[in-house]
Image (cartoon, rainbow, N blue to C red):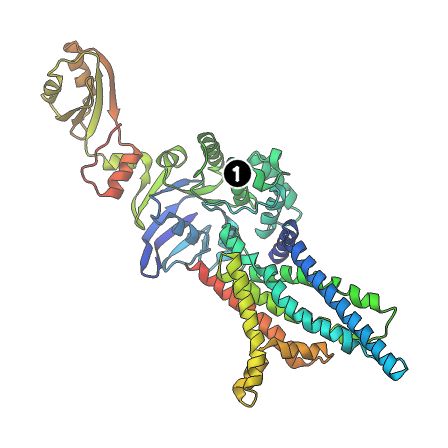
């Protein structure tokens, strides 16, 4: 067994021996469940209204009126929930002085960073997989396209990965978990606002850069069913860059 | 097994260790003695290849700590001052994780686990959560994680700090049993610890090595005179002055009404003369012993720059 998989296993295990994974997953799934219910209920009301108005069953696209709003809101929930998943990853190790075990073991800092990221990503992906209950439950009663749904899930996975890597970086700079949460939440929100700021300066190159840096626009493409290299590159490059920064931060702490 | 040459580490403008050089032979136990903040932990961290030095070199088991960190880490078992324990794990889970982390092959891991648990008498608590263990057991689990991959070198940072006297004796006993088959460096600011387990002592103060020798030789090197403690049943009131008149005596210090500390020139053993003198005067000789400098005295003399610090029993 490679040291990375030892770290991944240990981290996944510690998610489930503490209440963190259960609480985070419960809150996440509850919110997604409620969101899905509201979206379906709204769609149902709208279709009834249209039925009354037109006298025939309208041709409603479930992808547009149910899943797209659910995924758009899921992004906001991720913003709140993901920092909770990453806050302890390095902060706790430093506080409890167990980091010393990791850095004196024959593993590289890359192994440690990647191992921790994969563990958090696996837990996140597991959480996300449970939300598939919604579309699966709707499938027998309604017609919708699976492809845009899958690309939307790809979008959530990629954006979740980006948020997780940013959260890992925040956890790397402090030994206080609360500070780690605030830093990652604040940092993510800042990038979120870049999208808005990009619209304000839409005419300038600066505005275009800001818009590109915001994950929102890239995420929206994927939710719409549009998979472009540019968006996938944005997320993967973002994840790699955040993990690289985390590596530098942890490495620099060896010198102090 | 360990060679350290001209090692210097600076944290910004602060020099943690300066020009530290020493070596440890295979199977030897070396105590790193110094007050808190002397640079012991910094030196140990550099040796574990977890912290780079500003200048100088350190080699462990033939590998350079900076150029071959992975090989060095494989060769070392390190117990930091605070044992790095995941308290939500059981002892077995924790040691299994550490074994994997240290690169113990999966097929060898169960054997390594059993050997370590037995070596540290942890069998009875193997299934218990580390959080629920006593301080002494936690320290032993900490030592177990350093031993799980059977490294040739052990580096123990203050291994007995915070333990009760019984636990201290147990840990020292363990270290003694590990000596010989392992090369051990242990740091301590507790003086008897160095004398109890180590063959050689390196004294570090303000980041510099102030002495390095065997414990006996250190005392001998620093001793500037021979001292004899003399206890008499009924000394005459002028006993102190009369002792002073004996040939070779430099000074006589009266500790209490019956005990005298007699200092002579180096190489001049006064015991025979003193015994004869006390018997002849019928003072009732109760005890006569040579006072050697304790490590504590050596330590104080070296670190406090107090030229006048004298040895006391």
| Residue drawn at (80%, 68%) of the image | A135
Q: In the rendered image, is residue B131 in sight?
A: yes
Q: Residues within 10 Å of mark 1 (few under 14, many from 20)?
A: many
Rendering quarter of residue A7: bottom right
Q: Residue at x 64, y 59 (%)?
A: A119
Q: Chain of mark 1?
A: B
Q: Residue at x 39, y 52 (%)?
A: B42
Of residues A190 and A239, the one nearer the viewer is A190
**Residue at (54, 60) in percent of width and height:** A108
* Residue A137, above or below B246: below
The secondary structure type at the circle numbered 1 is helix
Q: Which residue is mark 1?
A: B140
Judge by depth and name the residue closer to the eye, A221 or A77: A77
The location of residue A129, given as percent across then percent down, is 74, 63
Residue B227 in the image: state x and y as whole percent.
Answer: 21, 27
Location of residue B197 (image quadrant): top left
Asked whether B122 or A170 is in front, the reply is A170
Q: Is residue A58 visible?
A: no
**Is A221 placed above or below B61 here?**
below
Q: Is residue A16 left or right of residue B132?
A: right
Residue at the limit of the structure toward the right, as seen here:
A56
Q: Is residue B183 above or below residue A126?
A: above
Quadrant into which the C terminus of chain B falls: top left
Residue B107, image x, y percentages: 67, 47
Q: Where does the image place residue B207, in percent across and percent down from the top left?
A: 32, 51
Please give the count of numbered marks on the rendered protein.
1
Judged left or right of residue B304, residue A217 is right
Query: In the orientation shown, which residue stands out farthest toward the top?
Result: B282
């Amino acid at each position: 067994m490679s040291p990375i998989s030892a770290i991944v296993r240990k981290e996944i295990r510690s998610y489930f021996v503490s209440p963190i994974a259960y609480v985070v997953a419960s809150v996440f799934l509850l919110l997604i469940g409620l969101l899905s219910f509201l979206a379906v209920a709204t769609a149902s009301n709208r279709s009834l209204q249209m039925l009354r108005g037109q006298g025939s069953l309208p041709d409603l696209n479930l992808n547009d009126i149910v899943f797209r709003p659910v995924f758009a809101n899921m992004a906001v929930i991720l913003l709140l929930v993901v920092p909770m998943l990453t806050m302890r990853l390095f902060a706790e190790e430093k506080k409890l002085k167990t980091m010393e075990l990791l850095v004196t073991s024959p593993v590289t800092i890359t192994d440690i960073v990647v191992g921790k990221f994969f563990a958090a990503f696996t837990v996140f992906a597991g959480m996300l997989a449970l939300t598939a209950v919604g579309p699966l439950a709707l499938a027998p009663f309604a017609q919708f396209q699976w492809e845009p749904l899958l690309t939307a899930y790809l979008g959530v996975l990629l954006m979740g990965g980006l948020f997780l890597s940013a959260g890992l970086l925040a956890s790397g700079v402090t030994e206080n978990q609360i500070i780690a949460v605030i830093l990652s939440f604040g940092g993510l929100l800042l990038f979120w606002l870049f999208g808005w700021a990009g619209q304000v300066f839409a005419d300038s190159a600066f505005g275009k850069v800001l818009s590109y840096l915001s994950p929102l626009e890239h995420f929206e493409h994927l939710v719409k069913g549009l998979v472009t290299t540019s968006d996938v590159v944005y997320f993967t490059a973002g994840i790699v860059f955040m993990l690289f920064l985390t590596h530098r931060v942890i490495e620099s702490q060896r010198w102090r | 097994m360990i060679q350290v040459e001209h090692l210097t580490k600076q944290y910004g403008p602060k020099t943690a260790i300066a020009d530290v050089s020493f070596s440890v032979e295979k199977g030897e136990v070396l105590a790193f003695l110094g007050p808190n903040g002397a640079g012991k932990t910094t030196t140990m961290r550099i040796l574990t290849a977890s912290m780079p030095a500003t200048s100088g070199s350190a080699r462990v088991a033939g590998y350079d700590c900076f150029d071959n960190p992975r090989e060095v880490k494989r060769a070392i078992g390190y117990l930091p001052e605070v044992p790095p324990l995941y308290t939500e794990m059981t002892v077995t889970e924790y040691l299994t994780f550490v074994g994997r982390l240290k690169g113990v092959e999966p097929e060898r891991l169960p054997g390594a686990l059993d050997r370590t648990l037995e070596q540290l008498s942890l069998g009875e608590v193997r299934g218990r959560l580390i959080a629920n263990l006593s301080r002494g057991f936690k320290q032993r689990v900490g030592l177990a994680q350093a031993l799980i991959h059977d490294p040739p070198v052990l580096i123990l940072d203050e291994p007995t700090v915070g333990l009760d006297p019984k636990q201290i004796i147990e840990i020292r006993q363990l270290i003694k049993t590990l000596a010989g088959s392992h090369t051990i460096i242990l740091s301590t600011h507790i003086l008897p610890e160095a004398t109890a387990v180590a063959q050689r002592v390196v004294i570090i103060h303000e980041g510099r090595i102030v002495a390095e020798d065997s414990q006996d030789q250190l005392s001998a090197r620093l001793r500037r005179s021979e001292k004899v403690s003399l206890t008499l049943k009924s000394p005459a009131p002028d006993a102190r002055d009369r002792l002073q008149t004996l040939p070779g005596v430099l000074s006589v210090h009266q500790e209490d009404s019956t005990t005298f500390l007699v200092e002579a020139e180096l190489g001049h053993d006064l015991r025979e003369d003193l015994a004869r003198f006390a018997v002849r005067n019928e003072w009732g000789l109760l005890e006569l012993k040579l006072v050697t400098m304790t490590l504590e005295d050596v330590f104080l003399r070296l670190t406090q720059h107090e030229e006048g610090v004298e040895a006391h029993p």
